[in-house]
Amino acid sequence: MNQTVPQQRTFLGHPLGLYVLFFTEMWERFSYYGMRALLLLYMTKYFKWAQSDASAVYKWYTSLVYLTPIVGGFLADRYLGNRLAVIIGATLMAIGHFLMAFEEYPIFFAALVFLIIGNGFFKPNMSTQVGRLYPKNDPRRDGAYTIFYMGINIGAFLSPIICGWLQENTVGEYHSGFTAAGIGMVLGLCVYLFGQRYVHEIDRIAPPAPERAGKASTAISEGQAATTPSNFRLLNDVAPALFTVIAAGFVVGAAWKYLQIMDKLAGKSLTEALVIFSNVVMPWVITACVFGLVAWVVSRTEMGVRDRVLSIVMLGLFVVFFWAAFEQAGNVLNLWAEDSTNRYLTTAAPTESVYPPTRVLLQEGDAARFASVTDRFKNMFRMKPRPADAAPVNWVEENLNPVPTAHYQSINAVLIVLIAPIMAWIWTRVRISIPLKMFFGIVFMALSVVVMIEAARRENAPTQTAMAFGSPPAGIAVVNGKVCEVVRDRETFVPDSKDAHPVDAGRLSYDATAGQLKMTGVLARTEFERIVRATAPIDYRKKLKVARGQLEAQKAAGQAPNAEVILDEVPPGFDLKYSGFPASAVSFDPATKRLTIRTEVADKDEKSLLVAAGEPAFRDAVGKLFVESARFKVSSWWLMAAYLFATIGELCLSPVGLSMVSKLAPAAMATMLMGMWHLTSFFGNFAAGATGELYGDVAPVPYFSALAAALGIAAAVLLLMVRKTNSMMHGVE
């Protein structure tokens, strides 16, 4: 039976449906990359979480958005169809982005869940629809994926610029940026819905052939489906669903049992056990499930098709190394741009201040919260007030001095838009096999990391200041010369010397002989504040707890926040300017020793108020290192060069991979295998996040050196396997 290819209107040689998908994906990527550009900064700079904790959340978010596509692809293949799956996914993601406008922890994590599940429905089905716009063996398909990839990166270019600018200049700050990402997702959904009449998928699955005894013939060419005899058809239909149910049950059961064992036998709390489970047990469970699914897919094929499926899997293993390094962009490189990069491009950077910028509250008497949802969205995009004597705004100069950190996330995207046509032209003129293209992709990614090694060496300069003490202040320990924060129990405030965390990978040290504090490299503000607030007196910490209790009771009663506590022992050097709160929100009367708080206080706000009570001599000394070390921030050109090499590597690998799966995958499993291909990004993002958690414990030079070494080894092994992998593709180029 011959399939009829519908007549499609074209533009520049491609169906109009490609451009509908182009703009839909552009707005979806606008939402994703706008969110990604702000996420880690939001957790570390706004929530004031430890970098390792923020990287752990970032790891699970960015990896799970690439795990769920395999389920979304299966549901689309079997039940929903591509169109409905895309609509469901876009709707869920829009909800998730709008939930990010609220800072409460339960809502924050719920937003991430919506985004993860929504992406699972959306991502594999969009990529598959591009391939299904063309008949089998259509030479335009590679060009279509390159055009589609440019749409992705136009969205990825615009979103950090817009969301980052909103974060810097509006009263809503990060929440304004997240809301803009949600608006982008709604626009993408509208484009997709109104453009459906132009999206004509060619049905590439042929009717079943007559049944025959034995295993089904799976030596099929592109555009044909594997035929399945009756005794295998039921297994073919239900195996993925059954596998998913069994895997989910195993995960839940193992999680519960593990938590019980840890809580009962090891004496650890459920929270600690959950952290260990998520970082140790869960990755292995997911890996086992994935390899089980791969084995099932391979078992359903034979001969040439099996070789092609195995070649997808083999190349995917090497692609994981690429993404593990590339996805440092939203994690470690984002922090590098914020803390270690001189972001003043046309003027000299001013001297750093030990005091944080004074907060601009969303509403007077309300720290970063509104009385209602309507008030929040109504006022969120208000511009921050400017001083009355401020000079006229020069938009270009203002955004170049300094460049908002999120804007650096646009470098990769704009380079792709510029370089992608060149790469597409090269692939039409130079015959290079798919494995060899991917080898070059990993090599260029390694060169990108080498650039960061040199940048880290230049940043790694010493600063020192006099600081003599007989014993470290409370909350501080010196271990092998390294200055460490000693975590105190939340209720009793008893120091636990076994839980001492070095500051900035141990680069802040104390020379007892010379009586000097020393810092190698740039001391980040987050690290400065973290080590200072560790020295706040116990009595003051308890008073803040009392004040927070008053505020929570007032909120429950519907009253305006107004808590007052008497500081019986005023911390020496108590200075509320270190908290960043305006006097209208937090004030202290030295005569009556009365601390008055007229705003809600979350965990992040309590941390800011603790800095105001840090041990003064230690705070002054570390503050001096913070100011002096800022001189060693490196030029923005290092990041730009690193992103250039990473972009070339990406263009050698990512669009080529999408096209490869479209060519090699059996038609009956096309969307599922596309979802499996996105698992390379899952494992890559997981590896990127896991290594990112170590960034605070490993200095930048050895950190980037280890990353470059891993990429070099992966590239060398892949080069040795190029010929074998080419033969397994059986002529597909």
Image (cartoon, rainbow, N blue to C red):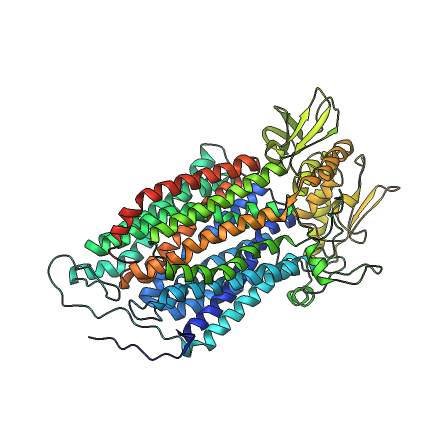
Percent across and percent down for residue 558 are 71, 59
Outermost residue to the left: 213
Left-right relation of 360 to 7: right
Number of labels in the image equals: 0
Percent across and percent down for residue 610 are 72, 41
**Residue at image coords 44%, 70%:** 21
**Residue at image coords 59%, 60%:** 178
Outermost residue to the front: 429
Do we see residue 301 in this rendering? Answer: no
**Residue at image coords 36%, 66%:** 141
Do we see residue 132 in this rendering? Answer: yes
Quarter of the rendering containing residue 365: bottom right
Q: Where, quadrant-wise, is the N terminus in this rendering?
A: bottom left
Position of 619 relative to 391 (above/below):
above
Outermost residue to the top: 513
Percent across and percent down for residue 130 are 38, 67
Q: Where, quadrant-wise, is the C terminus in this rendering?
A: bottom left
Q: Nearer the viewer, residue 443 or 584?
A: 443
Left-right relation of 664 to 84: left
Q: Nearer the viewer, residue 407 or 123?
A: 407
Outermost residue to the right: 591
Percent across and percent down for residue 574 are 80, 39
Quarter of the rendering containing residue 176: bottom right
